[in-house]
Amino acid sequence: MPATASATPALAEHATQARAAGPADRRRHVVVIGAGIVGTVCAIEMLRSGRQVTLLNPHAPAGEEATSYGNAGWLSSHSILPPAGPGMWKQVPGYLLDPQGPLTVRWGYLPRALPWLWRFLRSGRTPAHVARTAHALRQLLRDAPALHARLASEAGVPHLVAQRGLLHAYRSRADFEADALGWRLRGEEGIAFETVEGASLRAQEPDLASAYGFGVRVAEAGHCANPGAYLAALVAHAQSLGARWVTGQATGLHIEAGRLHAVRTDQGDLPCQGAVIAAGAYSRPLARAAGDRVWLDTERGYHAMLDVQARAGERPPAGPRTSTMVMDRKLIVHQMAHGLRVAGQVEIAGLHAAPDWRRARILLGHLFDLYPSLPRAALEDGARFWMGRRPSTSDGLPCIGPASACADVIHAYGHGHVGLGASARTGRVVAQCMDGQPPEIDLAPFRPQRWRR
Ligand SMILES: Cc1cc2nc3c(=O)[nH]c(=O)nc-3n(C[C@H](O)[C@H](O)[C@H](O)COP(=O)(O)OP(=O)(O)OC[C@H]3O[C@@H](n4cnc5c(N)ncnc54)[C@H](O)[C@@H]3O)c2cc1C
């Protein structure tokens, strides 16, 4: 399609600006493909380093379509373990047979998912594999609460990010000890945690079901009180720093002689000298257009929200005092600014299947089990459900770094379960890559080319 044939006025304006940029100022104009939390933070960091930035996204800013809208809000600098640890494959049949379990596979999608799933289950097959992933993720997540607190403050929403610690709830000490490898590796990465048991846990979490008798508190971790509102504020902040918003979908890249000339979109070409692929779970075809085959699929997840809110000066009627991950049910319960959220589930069903709201109802059932004093009859009918697509690589590490076909294109997707937390440092290192500067962390584990033989 000719660049200007169907271009909107906004795109025509971009074309003029791109032509005006001199050859000495390569990568002056960067298009960020995807305005989830990762793309938006990349945009802010590149604006800081003096670039002209366009955010390209198919939907209005911070809408429910972005996975960043509805996550559990954990800024967990300690979430450094790959989703699949040693021996996890042995638990998979049990999960799949349990109708209330945390994992489900749509059988029609299984043949397509199998090669990814096989790699995914093998990625943490030995303690050494888990340790390597943990070390890499720690570099990305270290300081996440502080980095987000700074971003939130700059964006005028400091109240949305807090560093108040997070809790992992186990039924018993024995269950905690069964997770010893993970906690040992966290300790080796310098993460401090304290355990709390029996009456002490009861005193701290009086509403939590008594079946849970053991907790682990991680004080350095933080949380976000409304991920959708936070994303909206960051997009507005990027715009206030000069970012332009284009509603549209990237369909490809115009690369010639190793240089980027435009991002192809369903609205026409968007001329630019740099691009960041940050389309979350939808990034694979764009990665291919940039010369890289990546093992990216989606682990879909759900949330249910209840209208449980603190009135001025009061506590909500029931729920966690500290945002809590319930370890055997693999879900997070978090008192958000706008209601009580339970989030979790992994559904392997690809990008395009309709949501299966039974998965969100399962979460809701768990929530009422876990906090029996919640007034179920009054709350259940008003529950709101959401489904999102975690962008998940087969080895549990995101893809960050320059593309093979052209160094003007930087990959920034695949953050799986930790994209909210990890977005802050990802934005910084993407801006450093775009500037041709050495990144502040070692990007070798995140190379998009790492699956090449
Ligand atoms: C239930 C659940 C709970 C979670 N809890 C947490 C948590 O507590 N803490 C945490 O750190 N992480 C959590 N996550 C993970 C986190 O939400 C994701 O890792 C993160 O949101 C990914 O951000 P992203 O910007 O890469 O993708 P997205 O937020 O999905 O944004 C990608 C954007 O790209 C757009 N796009 C797609 N295709 C194109 C195209 N061709 N052209 C232009 N734009 C395109 C999409 O519309 C979207 O707006 C959770 C996820 C789920 C599902």
Image (cartoon, helix red, strand yellow):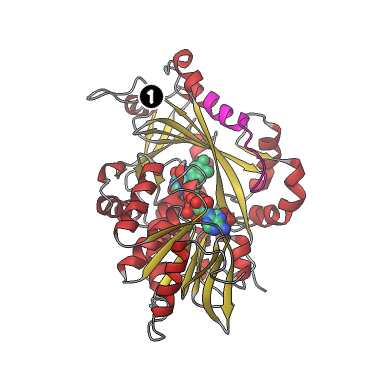
Using the rendered image of the protein, determine whether residue 305 is visible from the camera's viewpoint. yes
Residue matched to label 1: 308
Q: Is residue 362 a member of the stretch shown in magenta? A: yes
Residue 310 horizontal/vertical position (percent):
30, 25
Q: Is residue 438 a member of the stretch shown in magenta? A: no
Residue occupying image coordinates x 35% and y 49%: 192
Q: Is residue 162 above or below residue 441?
A: above
Ligand 1 under 8 Å from disc 1 Cβ: no
Using the rendered image of the protein, determine whether residue 138 is visible from the camera's viewpoint. no
Three-letter amino acid code at disc 1?
Answer: Val
Q: Give residue 388's quadrant in the image.
A: top right
**Front-most of 293 and 384?**
384
**Front-most of 368 and 33?**
33
Left or right side of 245 for 177: right
Magenta part of the chain:
349-365
Q: Residues within 10 Å of mark 1 (few under 14, many from 20)?
A: many
Quarter of the C terminus within the rendering: bottom right
Q: Is residue 383 above or below residue 166?
A: above
Quarter of the N terminus within the rendering: bottom right
The single residue placed furthest to the left in the displayed view is: 313
Secondary structure found at label 1:
loop
Q: Give residue 255's quadrant in the image.
A: bottom right
Q: Is residue 142 above or below residue 223?
A: below
Left or right side of 125 for 325: left
Residue occupying image coordinates x 38% and y 72%: 432
Q: Give residue 371's quadrant in the image.
A: top left
Q: Is residue 332 above or below residue 246?
A: above
Residue 389 horizontal/vertical position (percent):
56, 46
**Front-most of 253 and 399?**
253
